[in-house]
Image (spheres, rainbow, N blue to C red):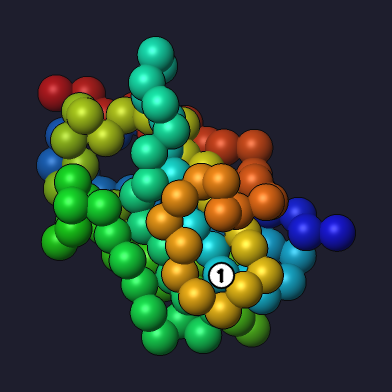
Amino acid sequence: QVQLVESGGGLVQAGDSLTLACAASGRYTLGWFRQAPGEERDFVAAISWSGGSTLYADSVKGRFTASRDDAKNMVYLQMNSLKPEDTAVYYCAAEVGLEIRRWGYEYPYWGQGTQVTVTS
């Protein structure tokens, strides 16, 4: 059974950095998504099973970096230069294929989410 647990969320100020972690029960292609109150869930980033490919939403490109430590079954999302509009619940999601996916419906497994709040 695929299990995902996010951690690392918190309350920060604009311009600060934060690293989210996703502990997985195995090695998967992982995506990061976020959902702000009253908004739809949006794609943020994804990293392939091999770690050789990454994909980012335009809104976070150049600020966020996805990485993985397969020895620990961990995937990270380094978030720099945070903005108030980055405030959301962040979810990691897994799928067992090898290619990056950017749509939520392509990920059958989801974590419980971690809150990130960025104040101005």
Q: Using residue 50 as the reference point, say whether residue 118 is left or right of it.
A: left
The answer to whether 95 is drawn above or below residue 28 in the figure is above
Image location (x, y in percent) of residue 16: 20, 44
Image location (x, y in percent) of residue 26: 73, 71
**What residue occupies the far top of the structure in this picture?**
38
Q: In the depicted view, which residue is nearer to us: 105 or 4?
A: 105
- Residue for badge 1: 29
Q: In the depicted view, which residue is nearer to us: 93 or 65?
A: 93
Q: Is residue 8 in sight in this rendering? A: no
Q: Using residue 47 as the reference point, say whether residue 113 is left or right of it.
A: right
State which quarter of the image contains the C terminus: top left
Crowd band around label 1 with a 10 angstrom C-alpha radius: few (<14), some (14–19), many (20+): many
The answer to whether 55 is drawn above or below residue 116 in the figure is below
Q: Is residue 81 in sight in this rendering? A: yes
- Residue 67, image quadrant: bottom left
The answer to whether 51 is drawn above or below residue 38 in the figure is below
Image location (x, y in percent) of residue 60: 21, 51
User: Looking at the image, which residue is at 36% across and 57% down?
Assistant: 45
- Residue 24, image quadrant: bottom right
Q: Determine the secondary structure under disc 1.
A: strand
Q: Using residue 52 as the reference point, say whether residue 105 is left or right of it.
A: right
User: Looking at the image, which residue is at 44% across and 44% down?
Assistant: 33
- Residue 111, image quadrant: top right
Q: How many marks?
A: 1
User: Looking at the image, which residue is at 38% across and 46% down?
Assistant: 43
The kind of residue tagged 1 is Thr
Image location (x, y in percent) of residue 85: 21, 29
User: Looking at the image, which residue is at 85% across and 59% down?
Assistant: 1
